[in-house]
Amino acid sequence: IPEHMPYALLGDAGRIKQVMFNYASNAIKYTDQGQIDITLSCKDRGDGMVDLTYSVADTGQGIRPEDMDKLFTMYGQLDMEKNYGKEGTGIGLAISKGFVDLMHGTVGVESVYGKGSRFSFTIPQKKIEESKGKEEQKESFDVVTQPEHLFWAEGVRILLVDDNEINREVVKEILDP
């Protein structure tokens, strides 16, 4: 946690965790050897808000330049020959981008084919409580959540079809407010 990080922020901790989990699980899936670094940076905007940037960098296989525009699209699986046998539906990055967009943030990606990738997202967060002492700051970090319904559709039914039970559970969890 950066030293200048506010002690408490107002944000959607659940969705932030989901995006980070997706980025981290992709890094693990596509990095056969090497390392994965997860970082968080915080930039004070001076208006009671901060921009948080979460980043996952890996030394995995990387992404071909011609595939970059497919990354955040539904079912946009890449390099099928090289990735044969790696589970996934190709919807994780699209869903993650949707969450980040709803939080008024941006996503980013840098990659060198054969050397690795860095996926990041930046979201604005309202400061609830300024930083505590350095020692206390490193021991805990609170995220205050406030339910906010950006879209509500009563009586909607969804047919979910997937042969992977874990994928079905993840989608149910994502759709359940």
Image (cartoon, rainbow, N blue to C red):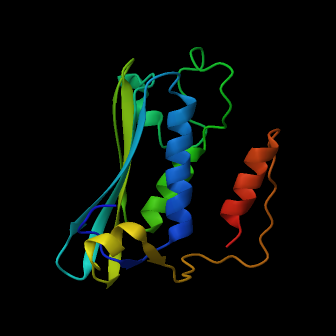
x, y (%) of residue 69? Answer: 41, 35
x, y (%) of residue 164? Answer: 79, 40
Name the outermost residue toward the top: 81
Name the outermost residue toward the left: 46
Residue found 80% across the figure and 52% down from its top: 160
x, y (%) of residue 22? Answer: 55, 47
Residue found 76% across the figure and 46% down from its top: 166
Q: Is residue 147 left or right of residue 135?
A: right
Q: Find residue 75 and report its image quarter.
A: top right
x, y (%) of residue 99? Answer: 50, 61
* Residue 115, visible in the rendered structure: yes
From the viewer's perspective, is residue 62 above or below residue 167? above
Residue nearest the viewer, comparing 157 with 85? 85
Q: Is residue 144 left or right of residue 65?
A: right
From the viewer's perspective, is residue 149 above or below residue 54? below
Q: Is residue 104 left or right of residue 165?
A: left
From the viewer's perspective, is residue 66 above or below residue 27? above
Q: Which quarter of the rendering shows the N terminus?
A: bottom left
Residue nearest the viewer, comparing 35 with 165? 35
Residue nearest the viewer, comparing 134 with 91? 134
Residue found 43% across the figure and 27% down from its top: 67
Q: Find residue 134 and report its image quarter.
A: bottom left
Q: Is residue 52 left or right of residue 158?
A: left
Residue found 67% across the figure and 73% down from its top: 177
